[in-house]
Image: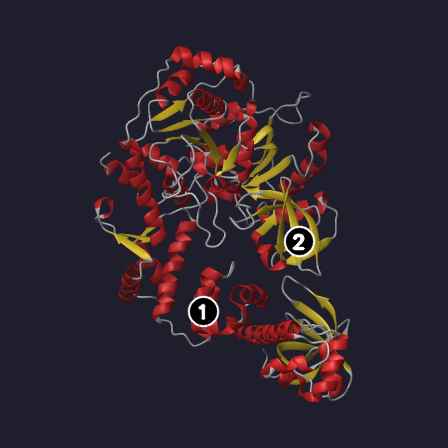
Amino acid sequence: MNSSIPTTTLEGELERITFFNAENHYTIAKLKASKTNSLVTIVGTMTAVKAGQFLKVEGTWETHPKYGQQFKIQSYKETLPETIEGIKKYLKSGIVKGIGPSTADRMIRHFKTDVFNIIEKYPDRLVEVDGIGSAKAATICSAWKYNHAARNLMDLLQEAGVKTSYCAKMLKHYGINAVDIVKNDPFRLASDIPGMGFYLADRIALKLGVSLDDPKRIKACLVHVLQQSSNEGHVFVYEAQLFAHCSRFFGLDADIVNHAIETLVDEKKLVVEDQGEFSDKRAVYLKEFYDAETGISDHVKALLSVPVVPPPIDSERISTEVQKKLAIALSEEQIDALEKILSHRFTIITGGPGTGKTTLIRSISAIFEALGKRVLLAAPTGRAARRLSEVTRRNAKTIHRLLGINFQDGAFLRNRDNPLDGDVVIIDEASMVDTLLMFHLMNALPVTAVLVLVGDVFQLPSIGPGNVLKDFIKSARIPVFYLKKIFRQACQSPIILNAHRIRNGEAPVFVPMDESDRLSEFYFLEEKDPAKVVSTIVELCTQTMPRDFSLDPLHDIQVLTPMHKGVVGTTHLNQVLQKVVNPNPVVLETTGSAFKIGDKVMHLKNNYQKEVFNGDIGTIRAVDPKGENFSVDYYGKTVNYDFTEADEVSLAYAISVHKSQGSEYPAVILPLMTQHYILLQRNLLYTGITRGKRLVILIGTKKAMTIALKNDTPKKRLSGLAFRLTQSKL
């Protein structure tokens, strides 16, 4: 702020709000100044204010070239009116829930100017007013305390320079004691409030006077670094890397960090391992990841220790049974795999597209059912489970639904004490299963059950930490069946043939879109200019593909991209595509997003209470501004959100390749630019094109494609699972 411009303080009643931006809380309003009784235009960031409130605002006068003199707000506080007329307007404004116009009149007649003092200090006396019973008095008292807590919390956030849009989330989570809770331990915000993270919690803590070397701050910093590492797919962090990171980014010396690690170990929040593989590099785990990794290893050991009595069925009978039940003639490769699977407690089936993985799942199910076994089918995501149900014609669930959820504590209902009610468990898209989910699945598996994991190990690893399927295979302790033969029908698909070429590091073969009258399934459009790539994607989605391929832009076409940022990232593409695909007006604005009725959206994290999971795609069906809620249709199921939960969804006209795992779409558009260099990997390109069922269009540069094809060394994830399995005595 320029010190030559003096600040001024105004007090008055907020007459009306003429503009409010829900994303950044920029507000234009009219304030009726108490001293002059004139209307003043005030502008600035304000949250949770309503007409009828009395405010004390501090700021500077400025002259807008179009709108004239305005008062620019630097800070503001709510004040309570003192006159009968002011109190009456305040209470009639609806600011305090439970007090309408007639109730306000009766309260003022009874208590006069002492009404605020009564509500604040003697709420039991409210029943003296005609029409106010004990229940209504409790509602008024609760609303008053809530408003008071909101004002205090708003002040705290403003002073710390944190967006006041977090206020509603904090009040929802902590209630009216939010300020006291935050002051006592501001670092709780990082884990309790979605979207806040360590840095914002740290900003509030430092504003409250917490020192840089406060033990709570150091511990929160360590947990933050480990959580960030898990977001990148790692199960642990090497201690030396942890020291280096804390020194570089937070200015913390090794002794302080080491002491905090020891404290967190004593508190059973971290585990440090210096045995075996980590003898020269101590590994630091968050406790839940350590328990999950060691738990998986122990469960695998227990599973493989139980002998299997091979069923009295040979390859000829297997072939006959499958032919009779499914009208399918299995290949020798599939019959051999199926015969051996029947003799093992735990097996893995892997192979590329078109190699018969789904056929083998159907056949395994049919044979085990013919032997009188109960078969359970599951997949990591809702879309993958639905696809599995469609192709097998059997009931398939998400792994989360299979395990069940206790909504009180978020724990799974199925566990070691209450195992799954099945003899055979088959998991499709197993490459997507992360360390934590695999642990819970193993924990619920009866020790006498058969487990079959099916997946394409060449796809991208799970979004969550770990690389479980690859680690299982790497350990060489679990029988693995590689399906390599591409079936004749699949051989006719350019998508499948090109997928296998990419998997082998070979350039895909395609027909230029403008050089053939015949429609193909696979195209490459060369374009270097990112802006032209975006305009071409728009044209493809809105004109070319609907016209030439009879595809619906909203439901049939999915744009996949390696990154979120940049001109060809998900954020910008979603904004552009939303404008052209969905002409409806914006009805809901949140931080960073504007939503419309009919928008295609994706749920971003597992929400067990709503039974909607990370990666589920749906359509916004309704928005209720008064009730401050909206609803999304996910595959025929309506899920309701309140406005504070809007950050759990994002636009999904364009999504990342990582988020597309386990899904299939009629058509896929995949931009490949050299700007995506850091993420141009062969398995990313492979995963992206194998999401398309009928049509795949790549758009970008051949240089970017070449970079991706040559980069077959994806970033290594830190995980100890393969080593633990290798060292286990089974």
Viewer-side residue, 457 vs 702: 457
Q: Residue at x 76, y 75 (%)?
A: 101
Q: Which residue is identified by label 2?
A: 630
| Quarter of the rendering occupied by the C terminus | top left
The numbered dot on residue 186 is: 1
Q: Residue at x 69, y 21 (%)?
A: 517
Task: Examine the image and state in which quarter residue 492 appears.
Answer: top right
The residue carrying pointer 1 sits among few (fewer than 14), some (14 to 19) or many (20 or more) residues within 10 Å by Cα, namely many
Q: Is residue 221 visible?
A: yes
Q: Amino acid at mark 2?
A: Phe
Task: Where is residue 379? Give x, y as percent.
Answer: 48, 35
Task: Where is residue 727? Give x, y as percent.
Answer: 23, 38
Task: Where is residue 220? Give x, y as percent.
Answer: 39, 63
The numbered dot on residue 615 is: none
Marks 1/2 in contact by CB < 8 Å: the verdict is no
User: How many labels were placed on the picture?
Assistant: 2
The image shows residue 161, relative to residue 662, as above or below, that is below
Q: CA distance from mark 1 to mark 2?
A: 30 Å
Give the structural element (helix, strand or loop) at label 1.
loop
The image shows residue 13, relative to residue 672, as above or below, that is below
| Quarter of the rendering occupied by the N terminus | bottom right
Q: Amino acid at mark 1?
A: Pro
Is residue 357 toward the left or the right of residue 521 in the image?
left
The residue carrying pointer 2 sits among few (fewer than 14), some (14 to 19) or many (20 or more) residues within 10 Å by Cα, namely many
Q: Is residue 58 visible?
A: no
Mark 1 or mark 2: whose residue is earlier in sequence: 1
Task: Where is residue 502? Give x, y as percent.
Answer: 47, 28
